[in-house]
Amino acid sequence: MALFRELLAKGGEQPVALNALGMDALARRDFASAVSFFARAVAADPTAPELQMNLAKAYREGGDAAGEEQALLGALAIDQTHFMALVRLAELHERAGDLRRAAERWTNVLAIAAGIAERSPPLELMLEHAREVVARQHASFSDALDAGLAAARDAAGPAGRRRFDACVDHALGRRRIYANECHGLHFPFLPADEFFDRDHFPWMAEIEAETDVIRAELDAVLAEDAAPIRPYVAMDPGTPQNKWSPLDHSLAWGAMHLWKDGKRDDAVCARFPRTAAAIERLPLSDLPGRTPTVFFSLLKPGTHLPAHTGVSNVRTIIHLPLIVPEGCEFRVGGETRRWEEGKAWAFDDTIDHEAWNRSDRMRAILIFDVWNPYITEEERDLLRAFYALADQSDTAPEGALQISD
């Protein structure tokens, strides 16, 4: 220390010497001297965030919260992503009881920590604490928000507030906003709506009214020994192991197709005459050789369909639940619903979705596709003309033009 003091006397304000003397004073718990030395070091080298961090430590251990905050902000002014500056600011705000500002800084810490590949146990404990603080803050704000907006949300009604609720939930970290992921044809600029509003499908009540008739036909066919059930998942030999492998060629997820890729199966439809007649009255998606597809989806007890996305967003998928035991759920994007027998819904299957049958009985749904309601009549005509030409070509990229599985 004597040599460092001699260096300062002869060579002026040297940041290395000042920092060393500050660390010595800090070790001796002479906080006033430590603050003085570190402040001089910062003045001598204002580009070094670690000098600001040492100054913040001297203020903290000396009980000067305002000084510590200014020093930490000084470090962030040099490097906004300085991990420990963000951590110390979060801790400082927590000590002061300012949960809102603490949660803001802990959120920054968590964002940076996402890029840290190897984490020590102490770091994991700190990040877990950060998540808890952020969750508490969000919960506190959410409670206040729910109370304050209760009247306005009630006035808007379920349909009027659905997108608003998703917006707020995303802002508070309670849900993701999912985008379309199309493995085939992607029609741009369409809203990525998870579950479509019923108002788009004025005919939906008509098919719901046929639920008992359709279920009766299904029950009759299922009671036969030769029900035309096929595995929904049937991968080609040599396909690498993937999330669908446990269901490959398995009747855990079975299907009976009335239409597939735009082609009517007359033999199957003959076994479901009233179902076929009801379907034919609907405005189905009609791209010859590609849509519609209509089938009974049969999910055995204990089966989980893993999260996945569909092929093209030109279609909308309709579910008409027929047999739904307790414990059957369906998630599309950030919303999970329970099927109700006879209550149809429409969703975009190019948004991440999955299904569960946690019951001890089979679940059965009639599934078919109609046009995406946001595609205009003119665009539908153009798509029909486009595919008519593509089908005549030997060079059309089939994979990119795919519509359904």
Image (spheres, rainbow, N blue to C red):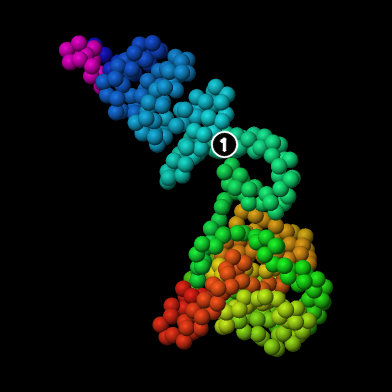
Magenta-drawn segment: 3-17
Q: Secondary structure at mark 1?
A: helix
Where in the figure is residue 103, as x and y percent of width and height? Answer: 54, 33
Say whether residue 144 is left or right of residue 289: right
Please tell me whether residue 318 belongs to the stretch shown in magenta.
no
Residue 11 in sight: yes
Which is nearer the eye, 396 or 6?
396
Q: Residue furthest left?
A: 10
Is 323 displayed left or right of 284 in the figure? right
Residue 189 position in % (x across, y down)? 51, 62
Residue type for callout 1: Val
Q: Is residue 8 left or right of residue 249?
A: left
Give the x, y percent position of residue 319: 70, 68
Q: Quadrant of the N terminus?
A: top left
Q: Which residue is at 72% across, 51% downward?
A: 158
Is 6 colored magenta in this rendering?
yes
Going 56% across and 26% down the picture, which residue do you hit? 98
Q: Is residue 247 visible?
A: no
Q: Residue placed at 73% from the left, 50% from the top? A: 157
User: Can you give x and y, in whole percent of width and height, for residue 228 in the image?
Assistant: 70, 83
Residues 343 and 288: in front is 288
Question: Quick one: quadrant of the C terminus?
Answer: bottom right
Per the image, the residue denoted by label 1 is 134
